[in-house]
Image (spheres, rainbow, N blue to C red):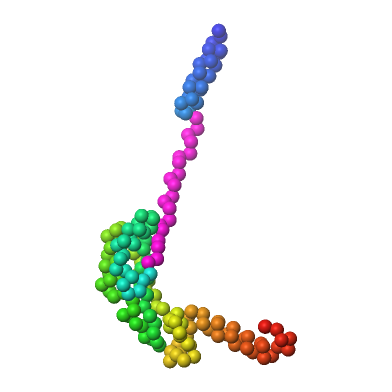
Amino acid sequence: MSQARIVRRTVSIVLVAAVASGAGVAAAAPETPTPAPAPLGITYAGWKGDYRAAAKRLDAFKAIGFQIVSFVPTYAYVGLDKIDLAAGPDAAELGAAVEGALRAGFSVVIKPHLDPPAYQSGFDPFKSDNHSWRVMCRGAASTIWIRWRRTTARASCSRRCRC
C-alpha cells in the first residue's frame, strides 16, 4: 500500500469517527432558551361580602395557574357625585382578601368600579334627579335615540313600513 493511500485511509477513519461522535463538525447553534410564558391574570370582582371566601377562590386560581389577581371592588353610584360605599366591600374585607393573595404569591391589582344607576332595576333616566352624563354610562342613551328615531321615522314615512 502506498504512503498516500495509508494517509487517505487514516484520514477517512478519523473523519468517520469524528462525525460519529459529533466532534470536528461545525458546532451546532446554541439552543435558544424558550421564553417564559406571559403571566396569566384573573379578575375577582365583588360587592359587599363577596370577598369573605377569598381564600377558597384564591386556592382555585392558584391551581389553575394564575399569577396575577385583579380585585375589582364594586360600589353603587347612586346620584350626582354620590357613591354608596356601604354597597361594596369595606376596607377590612378587601384588605384581608388582598393580604391572602399576597401571602399566596400572587401579584395584586386593585381596580375599584362604580356601577352607574342605569344598571339598577327600574331606573328611569327621565325621572332621575341626576342630570350627569355618567348616569347614562350603560348605553341607555343609544336606546333612547333608537326609540326617538323609530317614532319620528314612522310619523314622517309614507310607505307605512317599520323604519
Residue at the spot x=43%, y=56% of the render? 38
Image label count: 0
- Above or below residue 152? Residue 37 is above
Residue 48 drawn in magenta: no
Image coordinates for residue 113, horizontal then vertical, percent: 39, 75
Q: In this orientation, does residue 134 appear? A: no
Residue at the spot x=56%, y=9% of the render? 2
Q: Which of 4 and 101 is in front in this view?
A: 101
Query: Where is the C terminus found, in terms of image quarters?
Result: bottom right
What residue occupies the far top of the structure in this picture? 1
Residue at the spot x=43%, y=50% of the render? 35
Quarter where residue 152 is shown? bottom right
> What is the magenta segment's predominant secondary structure?
loop
- Above or below residue 33? Residue 3 is above
Image coordinates for residue 153, horizontal then vertical, percent: 66, 87
Image coordinates for residue 83, horizontal then vertical, percent: 36, 83
Horizontal relation, residue 50 to residue 148: left or right: left
Image coordinates for residue 74, horizontal then vertical, percent: 37, 75
- Above or below residue 96? Residue 34 is above
Query: Where is the N terminus found, in terms of image quarters?
Result: top right
Residue 30 drawn in magenta: yes
Horizontal relation, residue 83 to residue 23: left or right: left
Q: Which of 87 and 98 is in front in this view?
A: 87
- Above or below residue 158? Residue 94 is above
What residue occupies the far right of the structure in this picture? 159
Quarter where residue 156 is shown? bottom right
Q: In this orientation, does residue 39 appear? A: yes
Magenta span? 25-44
